[in-house]
Amino acid sequence: MPAKPGQRKRPTQERARATREHILDTAARLFGERGIADTSTNRIATAAGVSVGTVYRYFTDRAVMVDELLERLLETVEQQITHHLAGAPVDVPEKMMARVLEITTDVLVANAPLVRALVAGVQFYSSGIPEFEPRLRILIKVMLIQMLGPGDDREYDVMSFVLINTGFAAVLRASALDVDDGQRAEAINMTARMIGRWMESEIERRPRP
């Protein structure tokens, strides 16, 4: 991943990389426990057992840490969805969509305190987390092409937009801390069933080769 403005160059030595990841992991834990606004760089340094100077060696400020943590969440979701799409059968849209929603929900649930802090402390739009929509829309578009075959590029862009805003609004709610496993599964399955019916109708209306 190329460095964004304000980001330090990532270290190449193993020990330095480990120190950097340790600081980032500590920031993630503290953000989840205290919130982003109430977690200072000094507190992160103390909890990580390093000097403030060491923190600033790897991160110019707290905002960069937030960007890095968002990026880690995105990369995890992207990698798992890509792996799933590579081997998933395309003839059952409901099952395919359910698995995509499950993957995303599982990642968010595993990082629930941090996600809650990010939701509270970062400016959000569309599907709820900055960059989730444009990044995941590409994967969803690939999924649509797998299921429906080649088609109008603009139409697929619009369909991807609708799917993201429908499916991942449900995912964010399902990954909330006050939702139990049964409610989570019900929300995912209901959303997947709704989207699956839509995909089946799209398959039926398209001319067969």
Image (tube, rainbow, N blue to C red):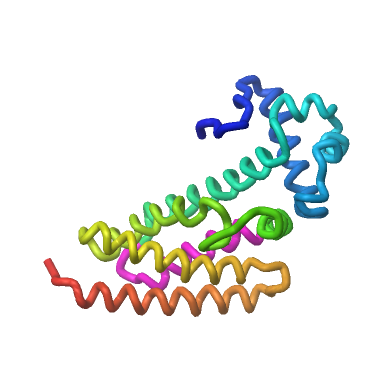
**Residue 55 visible here:** yes
Out of 135 and 177, give the one closest to the viewer: 135
* 190 on left or right of 180: left
Q: Is residue 108 magenta?
A: yes
**Residue placed at 85% from the left, 27% from the top?**
51
Q: Main secondary structure of the magenta part?
A: helix
Image location (x, y in percent) of residue 200 = 30, 76
**Residue 110 visible here:** no
Q: Residue furthest top?
A: 13
Out of 98 and 136, give the one closest to the viewer: 136
* 76 on left or right of 140: right
The C terminus is located in which quarter?
bottom left
Image location (x, y in percent) of residue 109 = 65, 61
Image location (x, y in percent) of residue 83 = 44, 50
Range of magenta residues: 89-110
Q: Is residue 40 above or below residue 101?
A: above
* Image quadrant where residue 206 sits: bottom left
